[in-house]
Image (tube, rainbow, N blue to C red):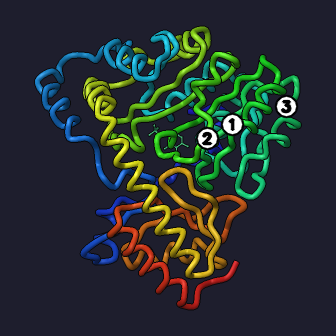
Amino acid sequence: MQPKPHIVDLPVYQPGKPIEEVQKEYGLDEVVKLASNENPYGFSPRVRDAIESELSKFYLYPDGASVELTAALAEHLSVQPDRIIFGCGSDEVIALIARAFLMEGDETIMADCTFSVYKSNADIEQAVSIEVPLKDGKHDLDAMLAAVSDRTKIVWICNPNNPTGTIVNRGELRSFLDRVPSSVMVVLDEAYFEYVTDSGYPDGLTLLADYPNVVVLRTFSKIYGLAALRIGYGVGSAEVIRSINQVREPFNTTRIAQAAAKAALADQSFVQSCREKNAEGIQYLEREFGRLGLESFPANGNFIMVDTRQSAADLFQRMLRKGVIARSGFKRYPTYLRVTVGSPRENEIFIRIFEETLSERGATV
Ligand SMILES: *Cc1c(COP(=O)(O)O)cnc(C)c1O
């Protein structure tokens, strides 16, 4: 059996090691995982009740159109319901956009480095990814604009950018959108939207009226704490959303995910409290990195990327043995570690182990 030739060399996504596995492998009592930007405060207590009321209904297919959740979200965001699409995580919405809009030989532009899912889906569709280096950890929108050709179909802007945590501000984004051809789709991935406290940060939804080529992606996996349930969404013009719906599987989100997302959305005080505690966590980690004489990129999500000035891959391994899981291995950033902002206690454990491990003799790059 022969798979399609263009998928033969695609890498299989390597997820971070689960806590249980690290615990067993190194014989540890406690493991602190700050590797996947999960919410250390879990999820709203309302979610549990919503899920419990679904338990007796597992034999029923979900509502394929997510009517109730769409209505609740449309009201929350003040957008028309026909401008919303849900996916099995916003990862699926990215895949569906690629499936609906990218053909062999099309070009698609993204930062280097950014969220890896844009490129992996472009590869699957045999599109050509043009990766534009970040400038000081930020999207270089001028260089991305200069990379636009008449074959360009989609530009991906991850705002805040994963892994660096930087944002493009309102003026920079508008100036970019003013100059990019309206035939080019601009996807604003706002997976960390709810965490951002910088007043210059643009809310992508406010741009939709002026720029119908914009699609905004958000998720219930991050601040809402529903990563395991796999539900995220896209907001765009009714035409674009219709095209994405045409390539969507009929039942791509589950009853539990829909009910949980609706309950989570209704508890904005949980969201606010997570945002505030996260901002305090960022302040703490930035202060500690400063004390250690290390530089980090301005953090706007629930993670922070720090230059360890030694091999981050090696440092990662040595911290893993002590029960702290962070993330290394970012293209062009071999000395940088990305750490999720945890609870105050997790952050303190991280800093203690980080400082201790840094001072051991590590490998240089
Ligand atoms: C986590 C993340 C997502 C998507 O997560 P889902 O769980 O698939 O909704 C999308 N974009 C970025 C930048 C992320 O970090």
Would you identify the image quadrant in which residue 10 lies?
A: top right
Disc 2: which residue: 201
Kindly report which numbered mark, 1 or 3, lies closer to the viewer in this rendering. Answer: 1
Which residue is at 34% across, 62% downward?
A: 343
* Circles 1 and 3 in contact, beta carbons < 8 Å: no
**Among the two numbered marks 1 and 3 on one chain, the one whose residue lies closer to the N terminus:** 3
Res 256 seen here: yes
Q: Residues within 10 Å of mark 2 (few under 14, many from 20)?
A: some
- From the viewer's perspective, is 35 left or right of 10? left
Helix, strand or loop at mark 1: helix
Distance from the alpha carbon under mark 2 to that under mark 1? 6 Å
Residue 314, position as x, y percentages in the image: 57, 76
Give the residue type at disc 1. Answer: Arg
Which residue is at 56% across, 33% downward?
A: 1
Residue 97, position as x, y percentages in the image: 60, 24
Give the residue type at disc 3. Answer: Val
